Amino acid sequence: MADFGKDIERPLGQTVRPRAASSGISTRAVAATVVVLAMVGVSGAIALREKPFRKPQEAVVSTPKVTAAAEPAAAPVSQLAPATPKPQTPGKTGGPQIIHVQTEEGDGPPKTAIVIHDPSTIGQNLKIAHIPDKALIEPSDTGPLPIRSADGRRPFDVYARPWSGARGARVAIVIGGLAVSQTGTQAAIAKLPPEVTLAFAPQGNSIGRWMQAARQSGHEIVMQVPLEPFDYPNVNPGRNTLTVAGTAEENLKNLHWALSRTTNYTAVMNYMGARFSGDAAAMGPFMAELGKRGLAYIDDGSSARSVAPDLALKDGVPFVSGDTAIDAVQDRGAILKKLDGLEATARAKGFAVGIGSAFDLTVDTVSSWVAEAKKRGIEIVPISAVAIDPQKG
């Protein structure tokens, strides 16, 4: 009866076909499987090709072309000097500069990128810091003399160690007398943190080799120059001392001898010189020469009569004055007390400068103190970072 009802409702001309028994996979399923396998095979073949569809020589990679000053690339140690970088524009650097970079020409409109240049990072790439820049050297009979480059760059800027540029409490420490003792010099370079500035005595030996070792270790360096103290020559700073009685020509000749002992330094620091630094007639030609050559002057702060600050401002010489001699007493407790005083000064006025000598006790004490001071938030900076630079106002 049920079948008869279904037959009545079925459209005319259609007969009932018996259902075929299920025999496994349908024809459509087989076809779909074949298509999927074919697609997988083609994809695998593409992925495993040794070369892409486009020929490698026809692939264009857009590489940036820097249109502003760029850092020099690292050069091999055997090379005498790196490629001369483009000039850094002198003047005020109130904050990061935006440098526009244009890519290589290619299909489509030119593309540009933006690079932020932080002025606090101005300085020599530490990877090539030991290699003299030929553009900053004037040859002389006694050795290389520092000089401003034709494009105006100064050794003070180029050979400076980069630092953070932060406005926190900063301490600069200069350790002098390097190259006098070979073993002492080696120990000072190896033990002292790279942020500590090293000063070389011109009477020392193998200064060029020690300069390279110091710069490779990350230290900024300065050159000491013997200046006349009171009670000279009973108190004698050493060979080729600049004196009040000497003519300007004689003193400049002695200055050039000291400056030519090595290169890659940012500044000159007095060795003794209480009488000389208090005499404007003697200091005038000396300071003018430093300005001409693009060097800073570091006054160790031992003489209150020094006329160096006024002359440095007049001649455009970056200037630093030491706050304290940290190792006048060779005692660990006394040295630590002086260093703690530097920290207090730095927290009060922003920065402080300590001057010491490369005695074993001084080197060991400074090394351990620096590690602890960093934990307390003190930044140890190179001497150039705290210089007053008349050119940057």
Image (spheres, helix red, strand yellow):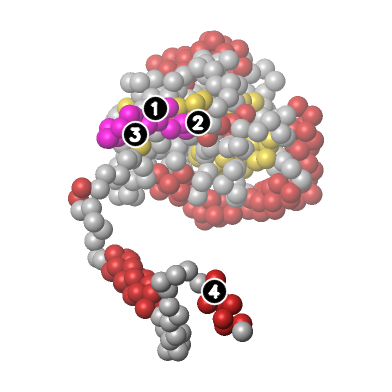
* Residue located at (44% from left, 85% from top): 18
Q: Which residue is mark 1?
A: 68
Callout 2–callout 1 Cβ contact below 8 Å: yes
**Res. 93 image quadrant:** top right
User: Does the magenta-highlighted stretch encompass residue 101?
Assistant: yes
Question: How many neighbours does mark 1 have within 10 angstroms: few (below 14), some (14-19), or many (20 or more)?
Answer: some
Q: Earlier in the sequence, mark 3 or mark 2?
A: 3
As displayed, is residue 365 above or below residue 166? below
Q: Quadrant of the N terminus?
A: bottom right
Callout 1–callout 3 Cβ contact below 8 Å: no
Q: Which residue is mark 2?
A: 117
Q: Please state which amino acid type lies under the numbered disc 4.
A: Ile
Front position among marks 4 and 2 = 4
Region in magenta = 100-115
Image coords of residue 102 (percent x, y)? 36, 30
Q: Please state which amino acid type lies under the numbered disc 1.
A: Ala
Q: Earlier in the sequence, mark 1 or mark 3?
A: 1
Question: How many neighbours does mark 2 have within 10 angstroms: few (below 14), some (14-19), or many (20 or more)?
Answer: some
Q: Earlier in the sequence, mark 2 or mark 1?
A: 1
- Give SS at disc 4: helix
Callout 4–callout 2 Cβ contact below 8 Å: no
Q: Which residue is mark 4?
A: 8
As displayed, is residue 362 above or below residue 85? below
Front position among marks 1 and 3 = 3
Q: CA distance from mark 1 to mark 4?
A: 92 Å
Q: Please state which amino acid type lies under the numbered disc 2.
A: His
Q: Please state which amino acid type lies under the numbered disc 3.
A: Thr
